Image (spheres, helix red, strand yellow):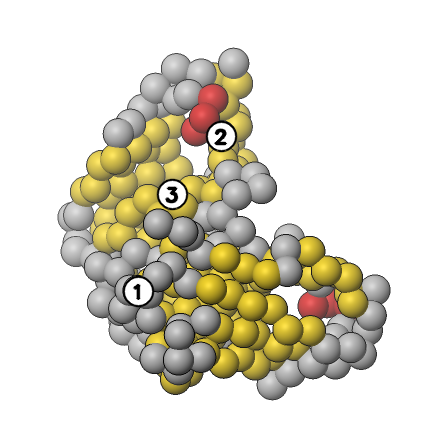
Amino acid sequence: ILNVEQSPQSLHVQEGDSTNFTCSFPSSNFYALHWYRWETAKSPEALFVMTLNGDEKKKGRISATLNTKEGYSYLYIKGSQPEDSATYLCASLDRDDKIIFGKGTRLHILP
Amino acid sequence: KAGVTQTPRYLIKTRGQQVTLSCSPISGHRSVSWYQQTPGQGLQFLFEYFSETQRNKGNFPGRFSGRQFSNSRSEMNVSTLELGDSALYLCASSFGTVRPSGNTIYFGEGSWLTVV
């Protein structure tokens, strides 16, 4: 993989349900993986910075895992709430300081 | 503390003109990076400045340039504007450089540029 790919592109989830989505990134020369939450008309907000294989980070109902050997990260949201509606971006940083963003997963929480 | 401030927020330019966008980082942050967001391409890295020096540059033509001042404020300039330069330009700041990874990047709200 030469690019950062996120799936699905868009996701509709019922309020109260849990959900997860994927970020795939180049595993060679990997340095760090960033997750951002981007609400419409606002600026992207940093969620997690992850570096080590097997890393798990948690912030409230949101958590993320990292597999650097196979080049993927999962973001989980437990008990989705309307305020979780946003685009979730991941970005891969390599050891040459090259940063590549995925195109995001657009999450819609249905009341 | 005040966040990353970008000006102007919205602007319209004509093809062939040039534009300068400004970014004031969070107080104490020395790294400023710039990104272009277009519907088709997503967020793409333009360049990063740290202590007035360009540390890193993305794959953009030479029409895109930037600089950083001693107070860490940064400007980016796009010359000879093309229709395809219409985009949201985001600036972000961090305490240190993008590496080490412990430095969280804080984004501004962006400058919307429309080229007609």
Question: Is the Cβ of the residue at disc 3 closer than 8 Å to that at disc 2?
Answer: no
Give the residue at mark 3: A22
- Is the residue under label 3 in contact with that under label 1 (CB below 8 Å)? no
Crowd tier of the residue under label 1, counting other residues whose Cα lies within 10 Å: few below 14, some 14–19, many 20 or above: few
Q: CA separation, marks 3 and 2? A: 16 Å
Circle 2 sits on which residue?
Answer: A85
Q: Between residues B113 and A33, which one lies in front from this camera angle?
A: B113
Examine the rendered structure and indicate whether residue B108 appears above or below residue A22. Answer: below
What residue lies at 64% left-to-right and 82% top-to-bottom?
B63
**Secondary structure of the residue carrying numbered label 1:** loop
Residue B85, percent from left and from top: 69, 68
| C-alpha separation, residue under disc 2 versus residue under disc 1 | 32 Å
Q: Residues within 10 Å of mark 2 (few under 14, many from 20)?
A: many
Label whose residue precedes the other's in the sequence (3 or 2): 3
Task: Label 3: state its secondary structure.
Answer: strand
Secondary structure of the residue carrying numbered label 2: loop
Q: Between A106 and A6, which is closer to the camera in this rendering? A: A106
Q: Nearer the viewer, mark 1 or mark 3?
A: 1
Mark on residue B28? 1
The amino acid sitting under disc 1 is Gly
Query: Residue at coordinates 62% horizontally, 77% vertically from top-left?
Result: B77
Residue in the picture at 39% in, 38% down: A21
The chain containing the residue under callout 3 comes to A
Looking at the rendered structure, the kind of residue marked 2 is Ser
Q: Position of residue B50 (x, y in %)?
A: 35, 77
Indicate which label's residue lies in the foreground, 2 or 1: 1
Tag 3: residue type? Thr
Q: Which mark is residue A42?
A: none
